[in-house]
Image (cartoon, rainbow, N blue to C red):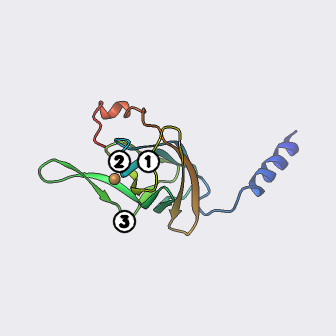
Amino acid sequence: MIRFFSIAAAAALLSTPALACDGFEVQDPYARASTPMSTSGAAFMMMVNNGDTDCHVTGVRSEAAARTELHTHIASDDGVMRMVHVEEGFIVPAGGHLALQRGAEHVMFMGLTAPFEQGNLLSVTLEFADGSEYDVEIPVDLERMPEMQMQGHDSN
Ligand SMILES: [Cu+2]
């Protein structure tokens, strides 16, 4: 029995494409726009790193918009939250995760090629510092409520 399982495990490893950041996965992604007329939108997700090295997400691209960027929110001196492009990218720590959520880190779509409609799937590619990539299909979910810890404030 033990031999059977180890052969199965080896086969599973061989069928996985070689990636430097091979412990990376995206869980529970969704995208939304504020209104049907919006020309921009955002995507949120849990980035999980099951590997033993940090994953450095340096960029993102998609056909869904003219420009797609990694964004976060920062508080300016007067306390107002503003979105900024995070040019250095996101670090997903080894054995850890990074939550992209409303009011914090997110994927930003600017100049939508088509309005976000409920149930649409957006093809998005995440780019890593080592040159590898991760493709994810992100469903548009306009009805999704912000996470509980955001206390109902929708800053997007
Ligand atoms: Cu943004």
Q: Amino acid at mark 3?
A: Glu
From the viewer's side, name the closer residue of 101 and 143. 143
Residue at (57%, 51%) from the top-left corner? 136
Q: Amino acid at mark 1?
A: Pro
From the viewer's side, name the closer residue of 74 and 42. 42
Is any atom of residue 25 visible in this view? no
Q: Please give the residue where the numbered disc 3 appears in the rendered image.
A: 87
Please name which of the two marks, 3 or 1, marks the residue nearer to the observer.
1
Disc sitting over residue 38 in the figure: 2
Q: CA distance from mark 1 to mark 2?
A: 7 Å
> Disc 3 on helix, strand or loop?
loop
Please name which of the two marks, 2 or 3, marks the residue nearer to the observer.
2
Q: CA distance from mark 2 to mark 3?
A: 24 Å
Q: Does 35 sit left or right of 125 as displayed?
A: left
**Horizontal and vertical percent for residue 154?**
30, 37
Q: CA distance from mark 3 to mark 1?
A: 26 Å
Contact (CB < 8 A) between labels 1 and 2?
yes
Q: Amino acid at mark 2?
A: Ser
> Disc 1 on helix, strand or loop?
loop
Say which quadrant the N terminus sits in. Answer: top right
- Quadrant location of residue 86? bottom left
Q: Earlier in the sequence, mark 1 or mark 2?
A: 2
Residue at (35%, 56%) from the top-left corner? 71
Q: Please give the residue where the numbered disc 1 appears in the rendered image.
A: 115
In the current view of this chain or complex, which residue is farthest to the left? 78
**Horizontal and vertical percent for residue 57?**
47, 60
> Disc 2 on helix, strand or loop?
loop
From the viewer's side, name the closer residue of 66 and 16. 66
From the viewer's side, name the closer residue of 42 and 104. 42
Disc sitting over residue 14 in the figure: none
Vertical order, 112 against 36 (above or below): below
